Amino acid sequence: MEENKTFFADGEDPKMIAAYQKAQETFKYFWRELSWENRRIIPALDVACVKLAFTQEIDGETIVEHMWINDIGFDGEKIYGVLVNDPNDLTNVQNGDEVEIPINQISDWLFAADGKTYGGFTIQAMRSEMSEEERKEHDEAWGMDFGDFDDIQVVFEQKEKPENLIEHPMSKNMKESLIDFLKNNPDEITSQDPSGYTFLHQEAIAGNGTSVEILLQSGADKTLKNHLGKTAFDYAKELKWEHLLPLLQ
């Protein structure tokens, strides 16, 4: 994972910078949810998008614009997607461009299901400055329930089932299906994609402990490295999926 500094605009509101940092710390939950959304026959999410800091040197000055992308992909290193905003000043990107940006330039993420939102840290920072009536109008304009700006949720049923912060319920519910799939498709256990990622890499990046355990029991090789020289353990450690580390060490 790249260690380049995160770009923020000069004079950025400290509350907004704190929102950027929280979004980066919790992005793994967004990706875990999207990893399961991509396997659902019937989609469960109304929205899934990421806000990134785009930069350009213009007249000797670093210009920063925070803009949203959708159609998200993530390989543990970079985020991929399609820009859905029109830049104000930048000329090096435009609406509809396919982009790839390092994870340390995340400034927000948001997913929503049944009208309820998760993440949206910069949005909540802005809502915190609004009156109650302004927040109501804001939420109606989005068509979503952003809830309490001081109580941002990052996973489904976070309060009712705090264990969901450790393991996604679908990872546990799909255990038998995964066992059957691997029995019928044993090549999936050891195959690597063109960049060297294995099924085990992918599940480690997504934080799916049950899936990781089943893959290892089925013979997955946790020492395999991708073309960047990284194992599944490396990504679990970088993304701070603590529950995976004992399995992959």
Image (cartoon, rainbow, N blue to C red):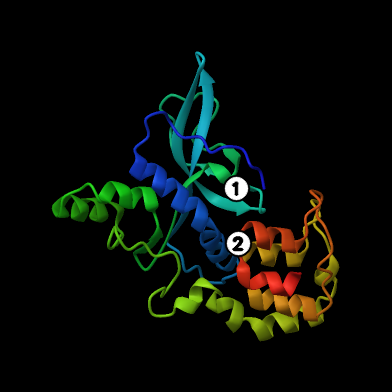
Check the image and report above or below for 238 versus 218: above
Q: Which mark is residue 202?
A: none
Is there CB contact under 8 Å for labels 2 and 1? Answer: no
Give the image location of residue 124, x and y in percent: 32, 52
Residue 108 visible, this orientation: no
In this rendered view, identify the residue nearer to me: 70 or 108. Answer: 108
Quadrant position of residue 36:
bottom right
Residue 69: % across, % down: 50, 45
Q: Secondary structure at mark 2?
A: loop
- Residue position marked by numbered label 2 in the rendering: 240
Q: Amino acid at mark 1?
A: Ile
Rendered location of residue 165, percent (x, y): 50, 71
- Indicate the position of residue 119 as horizontal and vertical percent values: 41, 58
Q: Which residue does the image show at 55% across and 51% down from the upper left?
A: 71
At a point 50% along the width and 13% down the height, the residue shown is: 59
Which kind of residue does numbered mark 2 sit on? Lys
Residue 157, compared with residue 129, is above or below; it is below
Which residue corresponds to mark 1?
Answer: 79
How many C-alpha atoms fall within 10 Å of the one at disc 2: few (<14), some, or many (≥20)? some
